[in-house]
Amino acid sequence: MRFNHTLGTLAALSAALVCSVACKHNEGELSVSTKSWQDEVRTRRAQIEKVKAENGAGFEAMDAGSLGSATLEMIPYVVFRVLQEIEPATFGDDALNASGFFPRQDLPSGHNGIIWTDPTQAAGTFQLRYMTRTCSSCHTARVRLDDGTMRLIFGGSNTEINLHGFIGRITSTLKTDLADSADAPAYQAFRKRILDSLTSHEPGWFFGASKVAPADAAKEVATVAANIDAVLGLMRTMNDRRLQTIGLLQAHSYAKVPTPPSLTGGARV
């Protein structure tokens, strides 16, 4: 597939570039002059840009495309934006940055690895975009240069990402807020907070008026508000399913090795 070819080629080129920077020659091996090293850096970067240019669709899918038609959490993007406001410790900008979804002003969400899906339609009545992660959440890195600026390494490994911790916070937060049923006081309070926040913002706030037309965003807000219990019920179902899956993997696979990592908290130290 073109996408896999693009990702593999970028990874190989980026790895070679990073290795060239990091690796030291042993005594007796040929040294590389400063000039030839600079030429090599320019050549590798030109190769990366060439791959990007020749594989535009594949690169876009890796860098800013959804990993699926909707994520397992099934969180409509307008709800995700509300959650950023009412549950900042899990979904806020600072929390996303701390989890490794570092800032990127060139992407619609403002974060590397976070995007929304294309609109999905149900029974011909409405369409919603869902929050999702991209391949770039793990496969785009950044390095700090001598002048303090950051350079993106497309196809590299994002050493800042902590998906286990991020998933752990999402599942824990949603389990508390969504409770076990629509009758639970916690759910009713959460439902009200979402509805109040949905109606307190102009449509352009949810996606950015330059990315999604405010009229379309307004339709999505109205759709979620009119179907709030169905939306939150699906989020509960998917969140409980993920918790069950994590529990099984933790108990029957990861627990079989010494000092196993936590699937909701990251590696143990």
Image (cartoon, rainbow, N blue to C red):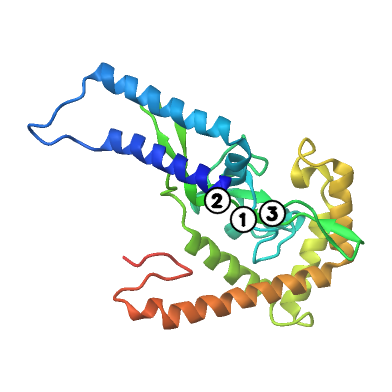
Q: Earlier in the sequence, mark 3 or mark 2?
A: 3
Residue 74 falls in image quadrant: bottom right
> What number is the disc on residue 211?
none
Can residue 149 be seen by looking at this rendering? no
Q: Amino acid at mark 3?
A: Glu
**Which residue was labeled with disc 1?**
67
**Which residue was labeled with disc 2?**
135
Mark 2 and mark 1 in contact (Cβ < 8 Å)? Answer: yes
Judged from the image, the secondary structure of the residue bearing numbered disc 1 is: loop
**x and y percent of residue 249 in the render?**
47, 77
Crowd class of label 2 (few under 14; some 14 to 19; many from 20; radius 10 Å): some
Question: Along the horizontal axis of the image, is 136 left or right of 73?
Answer: left
Question: Measuring 23% from the left and 38% from the top, which residue is drawn there?
Answer: 23
Residue 230 falls in image quadrant: bottom right
How far apart marks 3 and 2 lie (CA) works out to 25 Å
Question: Along the horizontal axis of the image, is 159 left or right of 182?
Answer: left
Residue 143 vs 196, above or below: the answer is: above
Crowd class of label 3 (few under 14; some 14 to 19; many from 20; radius 10 Å): some
**Which residue was labeled with disc 3?**
85
Q: Amino acid at mark 1?
A: Leu
Q: Amino acid at mark 2?
A: Cys
Q: Which marked residue is nearer to the observer: mark 3 or mark 1?
A: 1
Q: Residue furthest left?
A: 28
